[in-house]
Image (tube, rainbow, N blue to C red):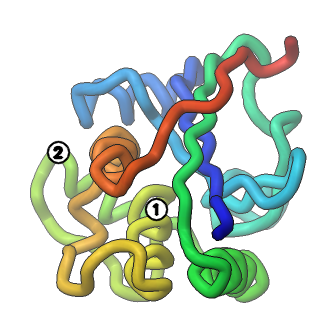
Amino acid sequence: MSSVRFVFFKGISLLSRLIRFWTRSSISHVAYKAGDSELIEAWKFHDGVRWGVSDFSNHTPGTPWEEWEVDVTDEMARRIDEGFRRLAGKKVPWDLSGVVGFVFKCGDDPGSFFCSEGCVQVLQDAGVLPKGLEAWRFSPVLFREVLKVVGARKVAEGVVGD
């Protein structure tokens, strides 16, 4: 048996506060935690907003975060890690239309993923979540709630920069 971890951020930047307002939650972002400090996430990089490998230092100091862990089979853990590394390796773009869809219900861009959308898709592909879920409908907080249903538990919390 293995486990995988996700870090949920309660962002304090202007964009994060807008996302929190639009989604009516305290959570603005989620990242897959690969190893001790490596994050794979849809984030701001030098060449734009896209999926890539990052770490906590890219987040605004003072941002609260929570780390959640869910038990999976060894095979699921391997497929999850490969799925996120594939998103980062291909530099899959951020799905702005999907984020706007939380407000205007306009759908998404099938060639890109925002943070929680990518997480749902990877977990579906690995067999942790059922197929057929419309990943673009999942805000970060809704993704966290779905993880709780499959047995996730909070294992750590902190503040960026502490």
Q: Residues within 10 Å of mark 1 (few under 14, many from 20)?
A: many
- Which mark is on residue 114? 1
Which element type, helix, strand or loop, lies under badge 1? loop
- N-terminal of the pair, mark 1 or mark 2, is 2
- At x 39% / y 68%, what residue is drawn? 120
Image height of 156 relative to 98, above or below: above
Q: Amino acid at mark 2?
A: Val
Indicate the amino acid at tag 1: Phe
Query: Quick check: can you spot residue 21?
Result: yes
Compare residues 94 and 131 and report the one nearer the observer: 131
Find the distance from the CA under tag 1 to the CA under tag 2. 14 Å
Name the one closer to the observer, 69 or 162: 69
How many marks can you see?
2
For residue 117, what is the image quadrant? Answer: bottom left
**In the rendered image of this protein, does residue 51 appear above or below residue 86?**
above
Please give the name of the residue rendered at 79% of the width and 60% of the height, measured from the top-left corner.
Answer: 34
- What residue do we see at 25% from left, 36% from top? 23
